[in-house]
Amino acid sequence: MKFNYLKFEKRDKIGILTLDRPNALNALNEDVFKELTGFFNDKETIQTIRALVITGEGKAFIAGADIKAMQEYSTQDGYDFSEIGKGVFDQIANLEIPVIAAINGFALGGGLELALSCDIRVASEKARLGLPEVNLGLIPGFNGTQRLPRLVGAGNAMYLMMLGEGITANEAYQLGIVQKLAKPESVLEETIELAEKIAGKSPNALRLIKKMVHQGVELNFKDAGKMESKEFGRLFKEDQKEREEGINAFLEKRKPNW
């Protein structure tokens, strides 16, 4: 698939997906969402990588949705745009491989919501993050009202959404929105290094960690714990290949060969 607003490259087993609309600060519109949908539907490409890094071209990660394009939206248009965006971000969240956001600059509105759909977030020390939709008479429309409180708690999420002001990367780090800070000039490389470390772990274990976290938050603690025990047990018989290699490598004091 040919892209107008995306760039993709591979470094060994790491995929790097760059939103490439710098003149509009990589703002999200229907065309960008269609290209993202096409990319994530390309299972053959996804299967060739063990981790994916998402970043933005230029000085912004993603500065939000394309506000000008939304100016004349009807109720149905707004609903459809919300559903398209949520569908794309669910594709990101549901990938079986780790996905890491390299937040190189502004991550506002839909940009932060995209980052929240990733598993881990690395941010430039000069990045600014926020959900400013309230200042436009809107609310976050791509599951931001749901993902953010699950990450930082209801009080912190409502504070950020109701105030509608951006916060620094360090403030986002203190809240747990961002897991790692990096120098502006090295944020992508540090994110790739992190992706490489994670990609060197058991692919099956990484997949199950994502599954347990995403499905577990929707269950009560007891049922989620039972699900965890079931998957843990399966690794000793049904899916034992990687578990055997990991334990043998540990006992033999060598790196596992996944």
Image (tube, helix red, strand yellow):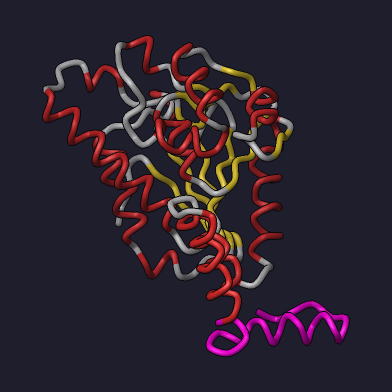
Q: Is residue 70 left or right of residue 66?
A: left
Query: Camera-side residue: 238 or 181?
Result: 238
Name the outermost residue toward the right. Answer: 253
Q: Is residue 96 above or below residue 167?
A: below
Q: Residue at x 42, y 65 (%)?
A: 45
Where on the picture, by quarter, is residue 84?
Answer: top left
Q: Residue at x 31, y 60 (%)?
A: 41
Q: Is residue 165 above or below residue 150?
A: above
Q: Is residue 37 left or right of residue 24?
A: left
- Is residue 236 one of those drawn in magenta? yes
x, y percentage for residue 85? 30, 39
Query: Camera-side residue: 157 or 103?
Result: 157
Q: Is residue 238 left or right of residue 201?
A: left
Query: Camera-side residue: 11 or 50?
Result: 50
Quarter containing the C terminus = bottom right
Q: Is residue 115 above or below residue 71?
A: below
Where on the picture, by quarter, is residue 219?
Answer: bottom left
Which span of residues is magenta-colored?
A: 234-258
Q: Residue at x 32, y 30 (%)?
A: 141
Quarter containing the N terminus = bottom left
Q: Residue at x 49, y 50 (%)?
A: 217
x, y percentage for residue 3? 33, 48
